[in-house]
Image (spheres, rainbow, N blue to C red):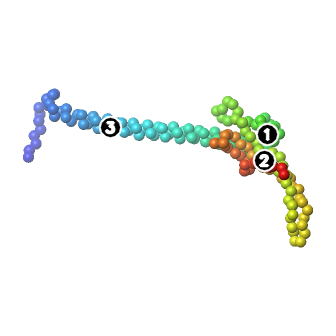
Amino acid sequence: MKIEASTKPSQPNSPARFKQLGGMMIESLIGLLILSVVGGGVMHASARMSKIQQQQTVDNIAVNQMRTLLMTRTSPTGADLCANTGGQSLTLPGETVPVAMSVKGCGNANFTINNVQTGGATLPAQPIASVRPVVLEIGSDTKMVRIGGSEVKSIATP
């Protein structure tokens, strides 16, 4: 079988010429569509990661500020943290309004130990005044940042 190359230009309206152009065009359009969907997905994922990273940075700054307050036991205004437990606030980066911060654990936990037996003797009741750990909380129930001891609940007096 011998293949001959034609030196004649193809006819502009011949059916063989138009038959090949459409398939290549559809393939390239489908490839471009797939590429744009993948590119949109990558852009969406990177935007979400950037938002999460920004929120984690703000949370980290809030934790560092709260740790500093807890170590010095003074509020940003210089007052004692335990002196006014209701009006403490913390200004986070990017926020114009200070965020309310609650202070828990100020005060002593007074209790009595009864009926302690050592050997054959029973010791009398021993009153104990213990300082509870101070806990700073900021945020809501769904996203609470807590610094200090464990959650401090009020101790009911007997």
Residue 79: quarter of image: top right
Tell me how far mark 2 sits from mark 3, CA to CA: 66 Å
Q: Is residue 16 left or right of residue 61?
A: left
Residue at 89%, 71% (x, y): give it: 120
Looking at the image, which is closer to me, 155 or 16? 155
Q: Which mark is residue 30?
A: 3
- The mark nearer the N terminus, 3 or 1, is 3
Residue type pointed to by label 2: Ser
Residue 61 visible (yes or no): no
Label 1: state its secondary structure: loop
> Residue 36's spot in the image, x, y percent?
39, 36
Residue matched to label 2: 154
Tell me how far mark 3 sits from mark 1, CA to CA: 64 Å
- The mark nearer the N terminus, 1 or 2, is 1
Residue at 63%, 39% (x, y): give it: 58
Label 3: state its secondary structure: helix
> Residue 72's spot in the image, x, y percent?
78, 43
Q: Local crowd at mark 2 within 10 Å, few (<14), some, or many (≥20)?
A: few
Residue type pointed to by label 1: Thr
Residue at 35%, 36% (x, y): give it: 32
Which callout, 1 or 2, points to the residue nearer the camera?
Answer: 2
Q: Is residue 61 left or right of residue 8?
A: right
Residue matched to label 1: 85
In this view, which residue lies farthest toward the front? 158
> Residue 6's spot in the image, x, y percent?
11, 36
- The mark nearer the N terminus, 2 or 3, is 3
Q: Local crowd at mark 3 within 10 Å, few (<14), some, or many (≥20)?
A: few
Residue at 71%, 46% (x, y): give it: 147
